[in-house]
Image (cartoon, rainbow, N blue to C red):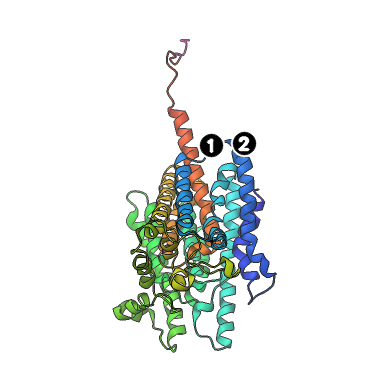
């Protein structure tokens, strides 16, 4: 399974891209490869975990996943949903979850984890030349929009979210001495290139917040100012790369604007966020449109508001009409924009709340491991805190749950951190365990 993990990472990073109609280096069916490898991992987890009694899975995770399963089940039952949309919804919502349990049943060594990080970094650096090629290819046929710069992750916004999360993990490794400052600086500059030419505006907000968070959490007492200055230096480098490139590509494009105009013109920002898209149309929705839509649409029926419309019941499927949700014609233009909107429509308030409880559990475990583990796992947990913030912000900006490159790596390293948290707790319990009643420690004999 340690070697199979390389295949899982590769499938998550490349399968959809290499099998896409534009590239078509592999058959279209290859896009289901991540689902297949997740199913294989699940089979292994069931057998190996049963033998080991899942000793490194804390009971809180059994409770939250059981509650999520119950909430997910209620939606289809309440709405009498067809099987096809349920299967389509399960594919996007559940396929990454087995990877959370994998580190608890497979004894991944620090060397294994270091190698996985190197592979992920390699795929991340690959995005730079692929993105540059895509930008020039789009320009050559008259396409001015950076939305076509998707790397191998199939979405410009997803590409930026993923790379920001990678930068946060690199920062955690660098701040704990697991990565050289020079190599971090080189990789930082290279990873800024795809984010600068794909015109994802959220980079302006998300990168400073999450990178500063990572540096501040890592800063020892009495050195927070010095570490903050260090983080600001990297952000200045990011700005020197991002702003001129972004402005250059948008200066002659109708309807686009520079970074300075976007930040200073509140009207442009409001227009970008709120486009007044209507239900039942194919109008492109703004982020505020998508956040309002589920509350307006479902508030008339309290049961649907609580339990949602059912897994996949407001979504489109490339598998055919029998897998497309009943409510897709009404709400798809909102669901495709944000993960949070998809959760609210299809899981309801109950399911969405449980998702955020689960994310809070992940964060608490990461903070504990970052504090108590001084090795590689502690460095990973530190970087994970910044990546966690990036992913959580991404839930209210993009439909990130539909992209396996993010969901697979996020759940795997969430499992790594949660497993390490349980191991540390068990080792501390053994050290602090009291002696049985009636026994006292023996005094050393006098010589």
In percent of width and height, residue 349 lies at: 38, 57
Proximity of marks 2 and 1: CB atoms separated by less than 8 Å? no
Image quadrant of residue 209?
bottom left
Report if residue 103 lies within the magenta region. Answer: no
In the displayed structure, 95 sits above or below 246; it is above
In the displayed structure, 112 sits above or below 9; it is above
Residue drawn at x 65%, y 51% is 40
| Number of other residues with Cα within 10 Å of mark 1, as a class: few under 14, some 14 to 19, many 20 or more | some
Q: Nearer the viewer, residue 399 or 84?
A: 84
Judged from the image, the secondary structure of the residue bearing numbered disc 2 is: helix
Cα gap from disc 2 to disc 1, whole angstroms: 10 Å
Q: Which residue is mark 1?
A: 55
For residue 51, which numbered disc appears in the image? 2
Q: Nearer the viewer, residue 127 or 38?
A: 38
> Residue farthest to the front?
80
In the displayed structure, 213 sits above or below 48; it is below
Judged from the image, the secondary structure of the residue bearing numbered disc 1 is: loop
Q: Is residue 32 left or right of residue 292?
A: right
Q: Is residue 10 visible?
A: no
Q: Nearer the viewer, residue 175 or 338?
A: 338
| Number of other residues with Cα within 10 Å of mark 2, as a class: few under 14, some 14 to 19, many 20 or more | few
Q: Main secondary structure of the magenta part?
A: loop
- Give the number of marks: 2
Residue drawn at x 59%, y 54% is 116
In percent of width and height, residue 217 lies at: 38, 53
For residue 33, which numbered disc appears in the image? none
Extent of the magenta region = 442-447
């Amino acid at each position: 399974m340690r070697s199979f993990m390389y295949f899982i990472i590769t499938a998550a990073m490349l399968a959809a891209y290499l099998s896409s109609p534009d590239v078509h280096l592999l058959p279209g069916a290859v896009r289901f490869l991540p689902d297949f490898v997740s199913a294989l991992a699940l089979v292994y987890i069931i057998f190996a975990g049963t033998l080991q009694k899942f000793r490194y899975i804390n009971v809180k995770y059994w409770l939250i996943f059981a509650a999520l399963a119950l909430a997910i089940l209620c939606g289809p039952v309440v709405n009498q949903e067809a099987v096809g949309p349920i299967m389509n919804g399960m594919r996007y919502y559940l396929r990454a979850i087995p990877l959370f349990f994998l580190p608890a049943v497979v004894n991944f060594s620090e060397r294994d984890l270091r190698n996985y990080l190197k592979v992920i970094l390699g795929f991340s650096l690959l995005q730079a030349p692929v993105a540059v090629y895509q930008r020039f290819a789009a320009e050559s046929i008259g396409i001015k929009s950076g939305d076509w710069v998707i790397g191998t992750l199939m979405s410009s916004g997803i590409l930026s979210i993923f790379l920001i999360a990678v930068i946060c993990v690199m920062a955690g490794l660098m701040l704990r001495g697991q990565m050289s400052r020079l190599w971090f600086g080189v990789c930082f500059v290279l990873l800024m290139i795809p984010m600068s030419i794909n015109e994802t505006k959220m980079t302006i907000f998300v990168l400073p917040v999450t990178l500063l968070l990572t540096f501040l959490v890592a800063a020892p007492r009495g050195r927070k100012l010095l570490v903050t200055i260090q983080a600001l230096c990297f952000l200045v480098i990011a700005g020197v790369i991002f702003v001129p490139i972004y402005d250059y590509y948008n200066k002659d494009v109708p309807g686009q604007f520079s970074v300075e105009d976007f930040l200073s013109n509140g009207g442009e920002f409001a227009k970008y966020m709120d486009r007044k898209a209507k239900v039942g149309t194919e109008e492109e929705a703004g982020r505020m449109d998508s956040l309002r839509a589920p509350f307006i649409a479902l508030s008339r029926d309290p049961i649907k508001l609580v339990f949602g419309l059912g897994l996949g019941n407001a979504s489109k499927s490339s598998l055919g009409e029998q897998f497309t949700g009943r409510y897709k014609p009404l709400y798809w233009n909102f669901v495709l924009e944000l993960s949070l909107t998809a959760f609210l429509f299809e899981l309801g308030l109950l399911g969405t709340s449980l998702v955020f409880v689960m994310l809070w559990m992940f964060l608490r475990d990461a903070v504990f491991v970052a504090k108590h583990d001084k090795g590689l796992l502690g460095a990973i947990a530190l970087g994970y805190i910044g990546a966690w913030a990036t992913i959580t912000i991404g839930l209210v900006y993009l439909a990130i749950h539909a992209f396996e490159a993010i969901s697979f790596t996020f759940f795997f390293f969430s499992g790594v951190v949660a497993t390490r948290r349980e191991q540390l707790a068990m080792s501390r319990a053994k050290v602090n365990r009291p002696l049985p009643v009636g026994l006292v420690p023996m005094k050393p004999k006098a010589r």
